[in-house]
């Protein structure tokens, strides 16, 4: 591609990690007000990055911009292709989106709902293939929603709905998954299930980018992007001490990150 | 795949509804003061033939076709606006058609259901043009189709303003009041074969178009952002579907007046029977609309026989009653869960 964003002065491309997303000077305005003020960052392919930051930092807006759902200025590259000029269907095959609080029709059957995730891979009028059926089946089983496949969406509880929607996003089998608050309404065991699914996805070289409120879960990621007032103030590995202090800083030092049994936990600082 | 066998197949429901439609048309062609008799004597007796072939049959077929157009438009509106209370008239087509008829009546006089071909053509044409222009006005006011809420609000505004203009015209020309009232209540009394052919033709076009484009409605049922992320061409298909909506509603309204509740109730009835994808929902709603309208038309003819009620009154009573029942039923089932 002519417009590869990777600047590489030495000319050694061999050891550079492959980038799922590269963002250059990204500005986004919502209702006439600029919300993201020039973001430059990259997401390494096959890793899980969680975006954290206080309310109103622009986390969801950034995620939406990455999904191509917002008009932006600046450039976004998805695997070295300019996102906005990509073919609509090709983009949909490579990019899966799980939004927050999206209103879903109550009348949809769970099976049909998850099958909608196969849409980017189907021809316009074609019936679902055997492969589509098996993908939907494994997505429903992975999110433990298989038993409800005949129910309509209205018959499910909040947590059950979230698991079905997660199954729908997984059914796309995209190289990159964007998830906005995927743990909403999930009880602790299913949060852990989600964690394991994400680990499984990244082990298969899927890139996962999530916005998470719960810092304990966010710190389970490979990398953390810390946002504040429409800017990315830090991006680094979860285990990095610099990352910890950046997270503590954007939350006004009201929390402290501790190590516990080889995991990172965020506790309130009283 | 067991999950295909365990649920009601939309195909079977479609066939049953089609059978109901044919049965209703047959029944309609045999209802009237002379009853089934005209059927049996039709081959020998010219008058009986005329009654069945020129009056009763086109009326029933037309009622069915108009109901089917409204059912389709209702399913389309509810899918597009993701609102179970959306009905075919919500983009202002009803008041636009009413204004068209009012203007035509005020200018040329006459009865909206007159049998003279020229008058009738003029009035149905005026109703159709009014309906389509009103939808266009709504689209202009909403500055396109991108914003659902803006579209709905613009539809309400167009409805109120055009309704006010209709009132103004009827106030200044009280002689058009009776004709207007007939139009507003809806009637299937004077549908001829020409109207039938027109409605069936438009219906065919609309059904095919919606069946092909309904994939976008499926994607839309997950919310707008997710639909976009699935790679569907949302904006262009939405424009196309709104055109289909306007065409179907305008055609039905032009031929039968403002028949209420069919477009609202038909998709609800279908969804209470079967949960399936939107292409089937739209097709089944269309058939269901046809059945509803035939039932209403039969009752309109029989209840006060030999006098007749406007069919719109019956659809309003039947459809309203059904929705009320549905509302209470869903409340009690939810409470018992």
Image: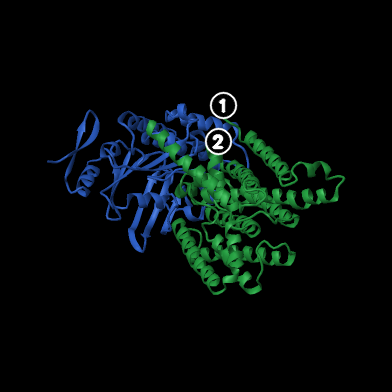
User: For numbered disc 2, what is the local secondary structure?
Assistant: helix
Q: What scheme was used to colour the molecule?
A: by chain
Q: Residues within 10 Å of mark 1 (few under 14, many from 20)?
A: few
In the rendered image, what is the letter of the chain coloured blue? A
Chain B is shown in which shade? green
Q: Nearer the viewer, residue A97 or B106?
A: B106
In percent of width and height, residue B55 lies at 75, 52
Left or right, B306 with reference to A37? right
Check residue B273 in the rendering and tell me which mark sits there, or answer none.
Answer: 2
Quarter that holds the N terminus of chain B: top right
Residue A176 in sight from this viewpoint: yes
Which-is-in-front pick, marks 2 and 1?
2
Residue B296 versus residue A143 in the image, above or below:
below
**Image mark 2: chain:** B
Q: Residues within 10 Å of mark 2 (few under 14, many from 20)?
A: few
How far is disc 2 from disc 1 in space, using C-alphas?
14 Å
Quadrant housing residue A20: top left
Residue A124 versus residue B102 in the image, above or below:
above
Q: Which residue is labeled 1 in the image?
A: B6
**Image mark 1: chain:** B
């Amino acid at each position: 591609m002519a417009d590869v964003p990777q600047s590489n002065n030495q000319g050694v491309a061999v050891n550079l990690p492959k980038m799922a997303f590269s963002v250059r000077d990204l500005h986004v305005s919502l209702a006439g007000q600029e919300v993201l003020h020039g973001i430059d960052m990259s997401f390494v392919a096959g890793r899980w990055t969680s975006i954290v930051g206080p309310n109103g930092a622009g986390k969801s807006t950034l995620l939406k911009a990455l999904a191509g759902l917002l008009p932006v200025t600046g450039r976004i590259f998805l695997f070295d292709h300019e996102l906005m000029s990509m073919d609509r269907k090709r983009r949909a095959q490579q990019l899966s989106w799980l939004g927050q609080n999206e209103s879903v029709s109550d009348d949809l059957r769970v099976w049909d709902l998850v099958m909608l995730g196969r849409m980017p891979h189907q021809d316009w009028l074609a019936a679902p293939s055997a492969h589509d059926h098996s993908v939907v089946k494994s997505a429903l089983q992975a999110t433990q929603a298989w038993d409800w496949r005949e129910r309509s969406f209205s018959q499910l509880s909040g947590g059950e709905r979230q698991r079905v929607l997660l199954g729908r996003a997984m059914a796309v089998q995209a190289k990159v998954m964007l998830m906005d608050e995927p743990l909403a309404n999930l009880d602790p065991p299913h949060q852990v299930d989600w964690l394991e699914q994400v680990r499984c996805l990244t082990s298969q070289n899927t890139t996962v980018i999530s916005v998470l409120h719960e810092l304990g879960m966010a710190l389970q990621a490979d990398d953390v992007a810390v946002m504040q007032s429409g800017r990315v103030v830090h991006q680094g590995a979860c285990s990095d001490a610099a990352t910890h202090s950046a997270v503590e800083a954007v939350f006004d030092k009201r929390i402290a990150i501790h190590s516990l049994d080889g995991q990172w936990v965020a506790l309130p600082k009283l | 795949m067991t999950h295909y066998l365990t649920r009601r197949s939309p195909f079977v429901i479609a066939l049953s509804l089609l059978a109901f439609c044919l049965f209703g048309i047959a029944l309609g062609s045999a209802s009237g003061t002379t009853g089934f008799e005209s059927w049996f004597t039709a081959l020998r007796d010219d008058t009986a033939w005329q009654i069945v072939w020129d009056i009763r049959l086109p009326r029933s077929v037309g009622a069915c076709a108009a109901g089917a157009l409204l059912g389709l438009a209702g399913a389309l509106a509810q899918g597009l606006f993701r609102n179970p209370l959306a009905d075919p008239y919500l983009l202002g087509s009803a008041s636009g058609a009413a204004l068209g008829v009012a203007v035509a009546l005020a200018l040329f006089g006459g009865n909206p259901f007159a049998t003279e071909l020229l008058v009738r053509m003029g009035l149905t044409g005026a109703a159709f043009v009014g309906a389509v222009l009103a939808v266009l006005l709504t689209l202009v006011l909403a500055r396109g189709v991108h914003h659902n809420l803006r579209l709905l609000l613009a539809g309400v505004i167009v409805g109120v303003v055009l309704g006010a203009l209709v009132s103004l015209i009827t106030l200044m020309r009280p002689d058009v009041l009776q004709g207007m009232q007939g139009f507003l209540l809806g009637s299937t009394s004077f549908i001829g074969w020409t109207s039938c052919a027109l409605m069936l033709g438009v219906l065919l076009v609309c059904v095919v178009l919606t069946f092909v484009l309904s994939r976008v409605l499926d994607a839309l049922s997950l919310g707008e952002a997710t639909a976009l992320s699935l790679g569907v061409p949302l904006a262009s298909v939405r424009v196309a579907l709104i055109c289909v909506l306007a065409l179907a509603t305008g055609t039905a309204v032009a031929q039968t007046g403002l028949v209420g509740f069919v477009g609202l109730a038909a998709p609800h009835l279908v969804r209470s029977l079967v949960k399936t994808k939107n292409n089937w929902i739209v097709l089944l709603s269309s058939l269901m609309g046809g059945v509803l309208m035939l039932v209403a038309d039969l009752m309109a003819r029989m209840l006060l026989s030999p006098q007749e009620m406007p069919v719109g009154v019956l659809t309003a009573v039947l459809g309203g009653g059904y929705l009320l029942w549905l509302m209470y039923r869903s409340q009690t089932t939810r409470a018992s869960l």
